[in-house]
Image: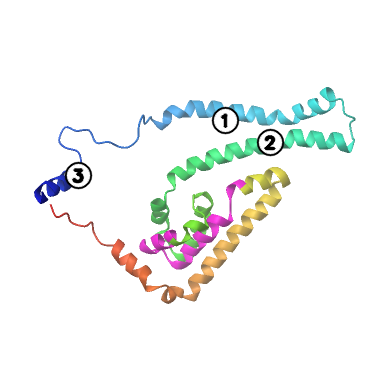
Amino acid sequence: MDAMEDKACCDSEAGPGVGEPEQSGVIGTKDPRSYLLPGILLLFGWWLFYRSLAPVSRWLTYDIFSLTRGSHFASAVEFFIFDTPKVLLLLILVVFGVGVARSYFTPDRARRILAGKREAVGNVFAALLGIVTPFCSCSAVPMFIGFVTAGVPLGVTFSFLISAPMVNEIALVLLFGLFGWKIAALYLGTGLAVAMIAGWTIGRLGVEKHVESWVYQAVGIAGRGPRKSRC
């Protein structure tokens, strides 16, 4: 019975046999270049739709609804007809773009980018990288351990962990659509400044000695090689 279990263990760890195709786990994978033309056409259609919002809102407000020009009610209706699809279009574009960007910025890639960077440069990179990565405050603990495992300085790590949940790209788009680029730029600049300054300050304080010992034990465990099979 033990021999049969050992053989099953060896077969499962050995991977696909000779002549057996390895399963990649991705079905129907296509060349990314095949999506280029449809993406350009969709982007052009989005731009045409976006440019037509202002004249369409005026046409609906004053020609179809026959509202009095210059009245507060007519201005409110025109603003609603114009801004509602405008914000939705901006959200669609940014959510799609951020989704594509996030598919390339995995936790491992983020760690590789930040590992080995000098602290001043690393704080800037970490704060900017936190904007486009799919990590929120819920993932702070595992991301902290992973960054320490990769040898990322604590100051750089905290710049990333502060920027990721603080600067939200969806909120950035909503602020731009509702209040204009000045408010959106103020929100973005303030979030990045807080992340960079806080990370730089934490790096100067030398708080490595206050990190719990089990974190460094996890680093030691992660640094070991793969466990040998009993087969």
Give the spatial CA distance, label 1 vs label 2: 15 Å
Quick one: label 1 or label 3, which is nearer the N terminus? 3
For the point 51% across and 71% down, the residue is 202
- Answer whether residue 29 is visible to the viewer in this image: yes
Residue plotted at (43% across, 62% down): 144
Determine whether the residue tagged by mark 2 lies in a helix, strand or loop.
helix
Q: What stretch is highlighted in magenta?
A: 142-170
Q: What residue type is labelled 3?
A: Ser
Q: Which amino acid does label 2 sit on?
A: Lys
Residue under label 2, please give it.
86
- Give the residue pinned by disc 1: 43
Residue 125 drawn above or below residue 20: below
Is residue 116 visible in the rendered image? The answer is no
Q: Is residue 161 left or right of residue 31?
A: right
Magenta span dominant secondary structure: helix
Q: Which amino acid does label 1 sit on?
A: Leu
Looking at the rendered image, the disc whose residue lies closer to the viewer, 1 or 2, is 2
Please give the name of the residue rendered at 52% of the width and 68% of the height, measured from the top-left corner: 200
Q: How far apart are marks 1 and 3 (CA)?
A: 46 Å
User: What is the crowding at mark 2: few (fewer than 14 residues within 10 Å), some, or many (at least 20)?
Assistant: many
Location of residue 26 by image quarter: top left
Question: Sequence order check: which comes first, mark 1 or mark 2?
Answer: 1
Name the spot of residue 173 as percent of width and height, x first. Answer: 63, 45
Residue bearing the label numbered 3: 12
Residue sitting nearer the eye, 168 or 25: 25
